Image (tube, helix red, strand yellow):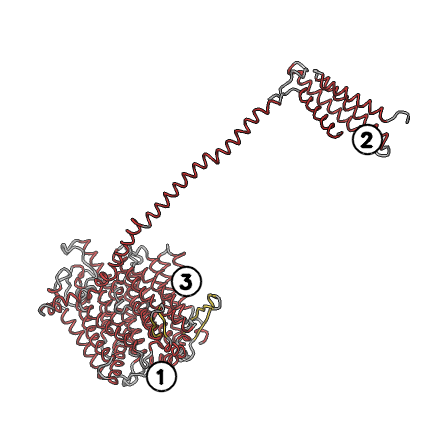
Amino acid sequence: METLLSLTPLVPLFPLLAFLAIVLVLNPNKRLSAAVAIGAVGLSWLLGWAIFFSSIGAGLGEQPFVVELPWMPTGRRLFVMSVMLDPLGAIMLFMVPFVALLIFIYSVGYHNLGQPNVEPRFSRFFAYISLFAAGMLALVVSGNMLLFFIAWEIMGLCSYLLIGFWFYKPSAANAAKKAFLTTRVGDVLLFVGLVLLYSFTGSLNLYEVLSPENIEFMKESSISVAGLFTLPALPTIALLIFGGAVGKSAQFPLHVWLPDAMEGPTPVSAMIHAATMVAAGVFLVARMLPLFEPIEGSWWLGVVALIGAFTAVFAASIAVAQNDIKRVLAYSTISQLGYMIAALGIGGFIAGVFHMLTHAFFKALLFLGSGSVIHGMEHGVHHVEEHGHGEGHGHVDPQDMWNMGNLRRHMPTTFWTYVVGAFALAGVPLVTAGFWSKDEILAEAFEKWTHKGVVSIPFVVWLLLTVGAALTAFYMGRQLGLVFGGRERTEAARHAHESPRSMTVPLMILALFAIGFGWVNIPKNVPLVGNGWLYTFLAETHINVLHEPYEKVPFVFSVAAFSSILALGGLALGWWLYRDVTGDATVSPFERDPVARAFARIPLVGRPLWLLLENKYYVDEIYGVLVVRPVLALSAFLNSFDDRWIIDPLVDGVGKAARGLSAVGRWIDTYIVDGIVNYIGYILDELARGLRLIQTGRLPNYLAILVAGVLALVGLMLR
Amino acid sequence: MSSVPLSWYLIVAALLFSIGAYGALARRNAIGILMGIELMLNAVNINLVAFWRYIEVTGLAGQLFAVIVITVAAAEAAVALALILAIYRTRDTVNVEEIDLLKW
């Protein structure tokens, strides 16, 4: 047991080594690169599951497993890298490497290995995605803020590299930049928060930093900002750290990067939306639980809950009006992350983590399924373009749902697994994982507001989340209807075909989990199947961290029944409305889309309202005007400043001065230095010309001088 | 033996040296100059031996010096005669007034 746990630091190491091996050595060999990457993450998966299963009942909640490694001694402080495993980390080790492994396997087929149209930078893809997995695994097992932040930033880098993987497409390059810069805003807030935590507690160890004494200390302290005003310490730190989660988990107002992130290859989207990136934000809040503990006067929790709930509805309403298959899923991710954040905000720690885990499975399933659909559609598009029938539609976008239809006939495996994913996301009662986790959040909110009354945050949260649940079911029904229902709306859809087995097998495995994983936490008071296992497992952490038992919300049948009706009704309505629509992507939405038509019937506000939804509330445009444009203008101004007025003239001036100086130097060199040298030479020359005359060459002369010299010397001596 | 004082030897040597010096300076013939130089060397030899006899009888330095000077003089005469012979062959003269090849 102990020995297995002591292998925890190895879990993130395998993919990291695979990354290094591929980058440094293996990259010319595509097949070997993929094999090494999959092998490495497979090892992580085996080890992760072994650790997880051995951690059940190992009492990790009371005594987390910790390995410490002195890293950098600086003066009186020693920075320590530490790996920690507690039930929260262990359950993440169950999910992350497993989903990552399936995504890796799927990528092999997605990038057409072994076919003529194989991705040229195939090895590089596997290197990046290995590093990505290593980053997330390191985050999960990190025991101190240092390693946590390093892993957090590695993921930021990898998301940039992978979203911009097809960087020759300007849209992908821009999306990569956008993702990096947007999450960076959150990262800076997180970093400031972590630094403040360190400055208050003098420790980087996650458990020590958030000990009750430290929380108590921070509650009474305040932070002085540049000597101008002071802020209460605890809410400031909590909100700064939450800012990191907002960026990484794509909550309003930093959600804009996530929908664009689908410019990367689809496995990357699955990786970002399910196993790694966005889960990191939720994981951060769960990890920093003591900061987000519902105590007297913890108003910042309300901020967390409201942002989450608002994001949930906001993103769900956008998803209703999107046409791109992946964009719908992207907004649904944002929406579901809103659920998790809202759950954590109202004190539903286990509900939030539970939803994160189930969501990882069914969102990975949906994204990989959409990748399979796109893959199939691309085949159809190529087929049509090569054989020339399907007269003159121009290029058919293989991602636009309006170009699809009736794919259930052409891609049956994808269809059935997609249905499972969609049902899980919508929360089809009793069977799917999404139902149990979403219901837990709703029950949590419901329970809280029945205690506090209608004018309370939990009520608002509950209301928003319920509306969000209805919208979610509706847009998933719509998507199923558009993609898989009715008749084919384009020639390309008619020639779509099923994806290779390396893609469909991961789908089937994920489908099993999208159903089965919910059963690990069916509330205890449900007859026959109730077990509350995950609750028991995670509650240990809760008790250890907060020193008080987690208040378990029982299963509320009325809430569950209500949300079930919404889910089934939404799905049915969406499917029924969109199953038989006609008109492909070239037709205006107000003619083809029944909901848009309904909107258009409302006088005056109807059409603009729909356009508002379709254009994502123009948030991108607003940011464009408020942030991007001023920054660009500032850069342009600074550029001209640089070019015309200050820097360039300065540089030119320095150049000119140097030229002047060197002219003076040259004059000195020619006339003074050279002159002196030449003049000395001249003098010597002239002297020699005179002196050589004494060399007569006549022996008697020499002898005479010799004798005269000797006589002179003798004379001198005798004197 | 002791009737002849040291000064006499020295006077003879000085005369001999002067004659040699005059010869070396005044003669035009290279062989004459060489003979003058030999005379000067022998004058020195007389001095060396005389000083040894009158002042430092127990040592050997004076005698040895004289022997070395004689040896050197012989070597010098051989080299000089060879040179003069070579010059005579090329220039057909041994008159030093006409041999001024070392001029500037």
Residue A47 visible, this angle: no
Looking at the picture, tell me which residue is in the foreground, A402 or A540. Answer: A540
Q: Of label 3 and label 1, which has the lower sequence position? A: 3
Neighbour tally class for label 2: few under 14, some 14-19, many 20 plus, Cα within 10 Å: many
- Judging from the image, mark 1 belongs to the subunit labelled A
What residue is disc 2 on?
Answer: B62
Mark 2 residue element? helix
Question: Hey, which quadrant is residue A313 in on the image?
Answer: bottom left
Amino acid marked by disc 2? Gly
Mark 2 and mark 3: span between their CA atoms?
A: 95 Å
Q: Quadrant of the N terminus of chain A?
A: bottom left
Residue located beneath label 3 in the image:
A17
Q: Tell me, for residue A549, which label it has, or none.
A: 1
The amino acid sitting under disc 3 is Leu
Q: Chain of mark 2?
A: B
Pointer 2 and pointer 3 on the same chain: no
Identity of the residue drawn at 19% across and 54% down: A385
Q: Viewer-proximal residue, B54 or A497?
A: B54
Please say if B28 is above or below A479. Answer: above
Image coordinates for residue A265, horizontal then vertical, percent: 28, 61
Q: Label 3: few (<14), some or many (≥20) within 10 Å?
A: some
Residue A275 coordinates in the image, percent (x, y): 32, 68
Q: Look at discs 3 and 1 and give the one toward the viewer.
A: 1
